[in-house]
Image: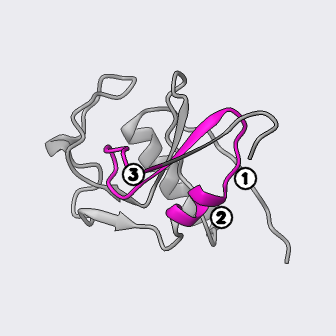
Amino acid sequence: MAVELRTLQLPVDYREAKQRVTRIWEDFQPQLAVHVGMDTSAKVIFLEQCGKNRSYQDADIRGFRPEGSVCLPGGPDVIESVVSMKAVCKNIVVEDVDVAYSRDAGRYTLQKRRVSKGRE
């Protein structure tokens, strides 16, 4: 089975990210997409089992906040991945980086695994 992997970096801009992600799904029609949010100062990769549509209070890089704190008006309150992030977390190896699993976006307390040089 052939797999084509594309990686794209999106700015922390609510409006632009919405437009670009919509276009990615329309243009490429992927069988799987993994959206990863990373803070450059973060020492942990969080694997979120679900994403929430509400309670976005922080401004993006342009100072914009979604109206009513909702990213996608009319969208579901929660979307859940069919991929078991708990299983992925148990099996992923990232040298010198913590990998954590969470069922509740924004609350990162459930499971962590760290791999250091020469250890698994």
Asked whether 86 falls inside the magenta stretch, the response is yes
Q: Which residue is mark 3?
A: 110
Q: Which residues are magenta?
A: 85-111
Precedes in sequence: disc 2 or disc 1 = 1
Callout 3 amino acid = Leu
Q: Secondary structure at mark 3?
A: loop
Callout 2 amino acid = Phe
Density class for disc 1 (Cα within 10 Å; few <14, some 14-19, many ≥20) is few
Q: Which quadrant holds the N terminus?
A: bottom right
Q: State the residue lying farthest toward the front.
A: 119
Residue 63 location (% of width, % of height): 30, 23
Residue 93 location (% of width, % of height): 71, 48
Residue 49 falls left or right of residue 93: left
Identity of the residue drawn at 46% across and 43% down:
17
**Viewer-side residue, 93 vs 79:** 93
Within the image, what quadrant is residue 88 found in?
bottom right
Q: State the residue lying farthest toward the right.
A: 2
Within the image, what quadrant is residue 109 found in?
top left
Residue 25 falls left or right of residue 16: right
Cβ atoms under marks 1 and 3 closer than 8 Å: no
Q: Secondary structure at mark 2?
A: helix
Identity of the residue drawn at 78% across and 33% down:
117
**Viewer-side residue, 40 vs 12:** 40
Q: Which residue is mark 1?
A: 6
Residue 9 location (% of width, % of height): 61, 38
**Viewer-side residue, 29 vs 59:** 59
Callout 1 amino acid = Arg
Precedes in sequence: disc 1 or disc 3 = 1
Q: CA–CA distance between discs 2 and 1?
A: 10 Å
Q: Please state which of the two labelled residues, at mark 2 or mark 1, is closer to the viewer.
A: 1
Q: CA–CA distance between discs 2 and 3?
A: 34 Å
Density class for disc 3 (Cα within 10 Å; few <14, some 14-19, many ≥20) is few
